[in-house]
Amino acid sequence: MSAERKDDHVRLAVEQQHGHSGHNQFDDVSFVHHALAGVDRSDVSLATSFAGVEWQVPLYINAMTGGSEMTGAINRDLAIAARETGVPIATGSVSPYFKNPDTAETFSVMRRENPDGFIMANINATTSVDNARRAIDLVRADALQIHLNTIQETVMPEGDRSFSSWGRRIEEIAAAVGVPVVVKEVGFGLSRETVALLEKSGVAVADVGGSGGTNFARIENGRRELADYAFLDGWGQSTPACLLDAGGAGIPLLASGGVRDPLDVVRSLALGAVAAGASGPFLRTVVDDGVEALVAQLSTWLDQIAALMTALGARTPAEMASKDVLVHGALRSFCDDRGVATGRLATRSGSPDTIHRTIGSIR
């Protein structure tokens, strides 16, 4: 059943990508164009550093799959593409491995194909400390992702229904493992209150995992006989909303959920993220066109991220947090309701004392 469910997830996620409208709240963020702000491309570095972690690029392939023969082949190709481009990568949830050790190869293939790359192992918030360590050992992980997915579990026919212990378990794992712990949502977003709780729990990094990309409520509803949870289709906060809401958090923020292209990556950096990740666009490419096409896609994204930073005058990803942005539409309404002052984002590059301040210091 677990292998069949993993294959269903891939099939339904790719179908979503094929039918995606393309619009989300990243479109409510635009840059103020300063025609003389540009720098020399040779002066631009894509390297980013946070919570003791160093990445050569501010882009990562986020958690997707594993646990079946088909998904193991996908993980192999994802790992090859990560190796060829230097992009960090996360495994899918390794829960199938805990239930059936015979699925180990569908995950460990990622380390074999990408021996020197940055790999994050992915577990759920019910995982024991011992199993968290097993997940790290399985792929010799450089970091551990713990995913939060209450809405997905709620819609999933065989999903969990007990969530009260998740916070305590995250705190136990963060204290016990020897690698940085990243907590991520799976597409419904992290509020600033949740990020504050994660910081207190000893979590190193929060991946806001907002709405706008792959919708796991819709995926799980598609697996239900009556498809009777369609009313949850729009649940949660978008990734830009989460970044603005949690600005000034005491831990670094990663941006995933609805990241469609290099412009969304650069928008994420401008809203306070230290890096941005995507799953759906890369899954669609590797499934439809193969690993060589994914290598080309990732290489193009990295080149275009650097090109946008050059035009905007950002020599590093961190400098993107001082660039002038405008917030429009429903995203601005969300910020107004949550007390986030967006107006000053449009002029923050003009004052020398604000040139290096992050999004949080405007709150």
Image (cartoon, rainbow, N blue to C red):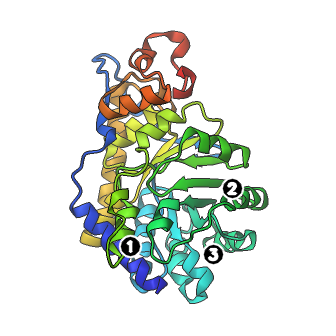
- Label 1 sits on a secondary structure element that is helix
In the displayed structure image, the side of residue 336 where residue 159 appears, left or right: right
Image quadrant assignment for residue 230? bottom left
The residue singled out by tag 3 in the image is: 138
Amino acid type, callout 1: His
Choose mark 2 or mark 1, whichever is in front: 2
Amino acid type, callout 2: Gly
Q: List x then y, in percent, for residue 58.
A: 47, 45
Q: Residue at x 61, y 35 (%)?
A: 249
The residue singled out by tag 2 in the image is: 167
Q: Are marks 2 and 3 in contact (CB under 8 Å)?
A: no
Instruction: Report the Cα–Cα distance between label 2 and label 3.
Output: 24 Å
- Residue at the outermost bottom position: 102
Label 3 neighbour load within 10 Å: few <14, some 14-19, many 20+: some
Q: List x then y, in percent, for residue 152.
A: 46, 64
Amino acid type, callout 3: Leu
Question: Which comes sooner in the sequence, label 2 or label 1?
Answer: 1
- Label 3 sits on a secondary structure element that is helix
Give the position of the C terminus as an image quadrant.
Answer: top right
Question: Which comes sooner in the sequence, label 1 or label 3?
Answer: 1
Instruction: Report the Cα–Cα distance between label 1 and label 3.
Output: 22 Å
Residue 316 visible in the shown view: yes
Q: Which mark is residue 9?
A: 1
- Label 2 sits on a secondary structure element that is helix
